[in-house]
């Protein structure tokens, strides 16, 4: 209302002014934008006209062809606003701005010009064409860069028109206005502080245009600044060092770790790629890094080769800016290695007498794994006399821990097993084969503690008797047994002349032919000696028993067979039945059955007269002798032993059946004459020869007796009181009953001689107690009688002895 009041005052002033200077011209001044019906001026009064005149004169406003903004109220005689008046529309920027019209009256017709000046009011705010604007500015824009802004428009004039601008905020930009020739202003925005997209990518500025009216009015425009990115940031890794772990033997393609670098830039400037930069390290070939920063395993990871890897990595953006970092990868051990057993030294064989704790092998054991996976314990199989010792870290020695005996076990397989403490534990093993070499610690042992062997006499020299065998538990040379006959003597003769032993085979050979009648058994020692050094030996007693063979025919001791066969037994004609004519005495130097003699009558002049005792050789009459019996009776007795085959001897027994010697003699002269020597001359020659022979034999016996005496002096064998010669088998009759002969005596018979050949010689000395028939000698006949007595009572050894002694003295 104060505005309106002021306008009215101005109007009044102008009216007064126009009334005074221009007759009939009225001017008013009103502000624009007055409401319809508002009073412009009291025209009646100002023109000095009566209201009646207005009415009668039909006063009206004439504007020509201009629009009517003003109307005339005739009742009141005032001008009122008919249409709202906009100065800016009416005049634009032209000043002053006025409405010119006339008020016309009739009766009389009068014309009064009226001018209404329109004054400006601040009814327009400055305005921008667009409410906002978008601007893109690179963050790399330099300070001072100018950006022209739009001007604002304010249709008001004067102070009411646009006066100034402001820009907010003013962090990066300030506003700079340049007055231009037309009075308008050029608006510029100037960069005064660098932009950083990374800090503020978008900024919103408000540009305000202000006029000078009261009240002041303004218009605004929003300026949206988008900061365009420039590659002004390098990528930056999130860590300067990355650490990661990987278990060994991980699969290819395992993602070890993920690194990341950030680039503050945008778009391609912010796109980061990764690469492994250190190509010197072999580890870098095991990995690659992908676009996402994943470090991926490419090859085998072996803790035993490398326990960690250091990989230099680089992140690079498209602009070539980069950053570097490092990945340290620790490899985690997996128990993937079993212990490695390395034999440093080993002996393939040791002698069985090796001392306790002899080292047989040394080894180093190594497990490349770490910690428990690499802690190794070694052991060996049980039941072997060895033990394993850890000498120092990772070194072991295998030693003996009890005595060895090759004869018990000559070879050992020792398996050494080493296992680590990993879970699950891994182990490895080696097997050593150890030979136990032989030491000569066993003597040969004979299979038996003593041997007895039999050999039948009359063997061929060189015959193998039997074999001794000794075994030696040792090996090879130490077990090579040689057999050695130990020196000893048998009956004064070195045993080596009886037997020999084959050194290699232990076969015992007879060196000579044995004669049971000379030696029945003997013993010796055989030594078995091995080939060791020093050699060991043992010995065994071998007893050889010689077995009798029926190699001797019975020997007839009585009656003595001479070439002259002039020995005869006398049987008186008065002899009764069972008269003992004589007894055939025979011996057999063999023994046992071979010496069991039986007697048989083979031939007889008169078979009905005599019989021979089968076992005792006694010739007895079996009937009464009568006169018809011839004087000369001749019996042939066969003495047979019981050997297989049996041997026999025959003896001719001449029996004279007569009462007197001359009768016999005459008969026997005939007898001989009849028989073989018909010629007397021949008989005498024979007789002479017999005498010479007798003398010769006597001499021989003397010489031999002396020799035998000396021999007996030097060597008395077999504690027997019996003289050596001559001999009669004692208890001869008894043996017939038992079938057993006393070998000793049989043997003794032969002590005098050395060989069977000398048995003949034996016969002669033995025959010393037997008469050699001399028909001319009665003395000898008497002795013969005595012999008969002896033969009748053969049972008493004592008697035998005395008789024999007596005979010996005869010699
Ligand atoms: C040792 O091993 C070998 C070969 O495997 C075998 O022939 C031999 O009989 C074994 N010896 C022992 C004493 O086990
Ligand atoms: C024979 O062996 C026995 C033990 O069996 C021994 O006492 C003796 O000395 C040995 N003889 C020889 C000659 O070696």
Image (tube, rainbow, N blue to C red):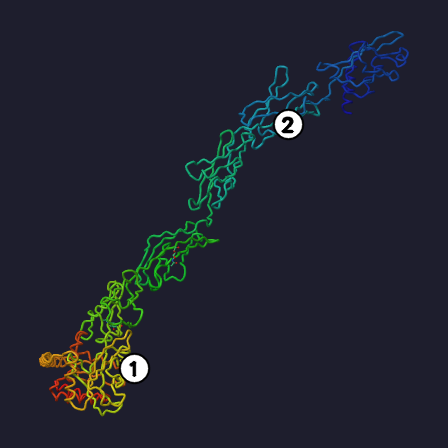
Where residue 14 sits: x, y (%)? 77, 15
Question: Which residue carries the number 2 mark?
Answer: 206
Residue density around tag 1, few if under 14, some if 14–19, many if 20 or more, within 10 Å: some
From the viewer's perspective, is residue 134 above or below residue 293?
above
From the viewer's perspective, is residue 403 above or below residue 373?
below
User: Could you say which is closer to the camera, residue 60 or residue 457?
Assistant: 457
Q: Quadrant of the N terminus?
A: top right
| Image position of 139 (left or right of 90) | left
User: Could you say which is closer to the camera, residue 425 or residue 205?
Assistant: 425
| Image position of 34 (left or right of 276) | right
Residue appearing at x 61%, y 29% in the figure = 203
Question: Which residue carries the number 1 mark?
Answer: 739
Q: Quadrant of the C terminus?
A: bottom left
Quarter of image, res 189: top right
| Image position of 768 (left or right of 73) | left
Mark nearer the viewer, 2 or 1: 1
Where residue 318 sits: x, y (%)? 51, 29
- Find the distance from the CA under tag 2 to the CA under tag 1: 169 Å
From the viewer's perspective, is residue 378 above or below residue 651?
above
């Amino acid at each position: 209302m104060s505005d309106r009041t002021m306008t009215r005052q101005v109007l009044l002033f102008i009216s007064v002014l126009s009334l005074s200077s221009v007759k009939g011209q009225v001017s008013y001044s009103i502000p624009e934008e007055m409401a319809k019906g508002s009073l412009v001026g009291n025209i009646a009064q100002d023109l000095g006209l009566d209201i009646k005149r207005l009415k009668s004169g039909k006063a009206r406003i004439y504007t020509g062809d201009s629009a009517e903004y003003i109307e005339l109220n005739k009742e009141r005689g005032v001008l009122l606003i008919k249409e709202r008046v906009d100065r800016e529309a009416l005049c634009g920027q032209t000043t002053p701005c006025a409405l010119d019209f006339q008020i016309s009256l009739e009766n009389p017709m009068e014309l009064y010009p009226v001018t209404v000046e329109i004054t400006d009011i601040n009814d327009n705010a400055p305005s921008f064409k667009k409410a906002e604007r978008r601007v893109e500015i690179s963050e790399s824009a330099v300070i001072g860069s100018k950006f022209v802004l739009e001007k604002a428009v304010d249709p008001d004039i004067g102070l009411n028109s646009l006066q100034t601008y402001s820009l907010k905020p003013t962090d990066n930009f300030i506003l700079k206005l340049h007055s231009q020739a037309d009075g308008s202003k050029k608006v510029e925005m100037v960069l005064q502080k660098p932009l950083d997209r990374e800090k503020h990518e978008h900024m919103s500025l408000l540009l305000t245009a202000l006029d000078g009216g009261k009240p002041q009015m303004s218009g605004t425009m929003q300026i949206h600044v988008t900061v365009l990115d420039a590659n002004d940031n390098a990528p930056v890794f999130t860590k300067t060092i990355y650490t990661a772990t990987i278990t060994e033997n991980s699969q290819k393609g395992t993602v070890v770790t993920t690194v990341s670098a950030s680039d503050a830039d945008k778009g391609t400037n912010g796109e980061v790629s990764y690469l492994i930069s250190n190509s010197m390290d072999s580890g870098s070939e095991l990995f690659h890094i992908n676009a996402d920063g994943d470090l991926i395993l490419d090859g085998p990871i072996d803790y035993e080769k490398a326990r960690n890897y250091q990989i230099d990595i680089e992140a690079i953006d498209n602009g070539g800016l980069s950053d570097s970092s490092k990945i340290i990868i620790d490899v985690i051990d997996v128990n993937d290695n079993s212990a490695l057993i390395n034999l440093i030294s080993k002996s393939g064989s040791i002698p069985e007498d090796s001392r306790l704790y002899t080292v047989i092998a040394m080894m180093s054991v190594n497990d490349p794994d770490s910690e428990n996976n690499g802690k190794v314990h070694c052991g060996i199989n049980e039941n072997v006399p060895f033990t394993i010792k850890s000498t120092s870290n990772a070194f072991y020695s295998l030693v003996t821990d009890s005595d060895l005996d090759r004869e018990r076990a000559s070879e050992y397989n020792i398996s050494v097993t080493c296992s680590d403490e990993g879970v699950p534990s891994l182990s490895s093993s080696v097997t050593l084969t150890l030979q136990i070499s032989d030491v000569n610690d066993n003597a040969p042992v004979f299979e038996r503690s003593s041997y007895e062997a039999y050999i039948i006499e009359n063997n061929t020299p060189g015959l193998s008797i039997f074999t001794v065998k000794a075994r030696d538990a040792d090996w090879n040379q130490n077990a090579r047994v040689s057999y050695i006959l130990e020196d000893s003597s048998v009956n004064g003769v070195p045993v080596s002349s009886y037997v020999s032993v084959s050194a290699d085979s232990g076969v015992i050979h007879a060196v000579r032919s044995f004669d049971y009648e000379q030696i029945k058994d003997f013993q010796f020692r055989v030594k078995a000696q091995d080939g060791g050094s020093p050699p060991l030996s043992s010995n065994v007693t071998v007893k050889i028993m010689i077995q009798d063979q029926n190699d001797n025919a019975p020997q007839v001791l009585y009656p003595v067979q001479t070439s002259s066969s002039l020995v005869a037994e006398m049987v008186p004609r008065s002899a009764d039945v069972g008269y003992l004519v004589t007894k055939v005495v025979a011996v057999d130097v063999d023994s046992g059955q071979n010496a069991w003699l039986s007697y048989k009558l083979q031939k007889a002049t008169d078979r009905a007269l005599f019989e021979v005792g089968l076992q005792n050789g006694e010739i007895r009459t079996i009937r009464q002798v009568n006169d018809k019996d011839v004087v000369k009776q001749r019996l042939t007795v066969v003495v047979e032993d019981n050997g297989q085959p049996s041997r026999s001897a025959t003896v001719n027994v001449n029996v004279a059946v007569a009462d007197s010697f001359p009768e016999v003699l005459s008969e026997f002269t005939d007898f001989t004459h009849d028989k073989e020597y018909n010629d007397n001359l021949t008989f005498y020659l024979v007789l002479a020869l017999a005498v010479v022979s007798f003398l010769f034999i006597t001499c021989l016996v003397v010489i031999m007796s002396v020799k035998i005496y000396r021999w007996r002096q030097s060597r008395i064998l077999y504690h027997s009181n019996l003289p050596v010669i001559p001999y009669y088998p004692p208890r001869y009759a008894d043996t017939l009953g038992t079938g057993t002969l006393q070998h000793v005596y049989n043997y003794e018979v032969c002590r005098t001689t050395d060989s069977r050949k000398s048995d003949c010689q034996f016969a002669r000395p033995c025959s010393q107690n037997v008469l050699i028939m001399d028909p001319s000698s009665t003395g000898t006949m008497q002795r013969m009688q005595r012999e008969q007595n002896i033969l009748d009572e053969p049972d008493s050894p004592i008697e035998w002895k005395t008789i024999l002694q007596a005979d010996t003295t005869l010699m």
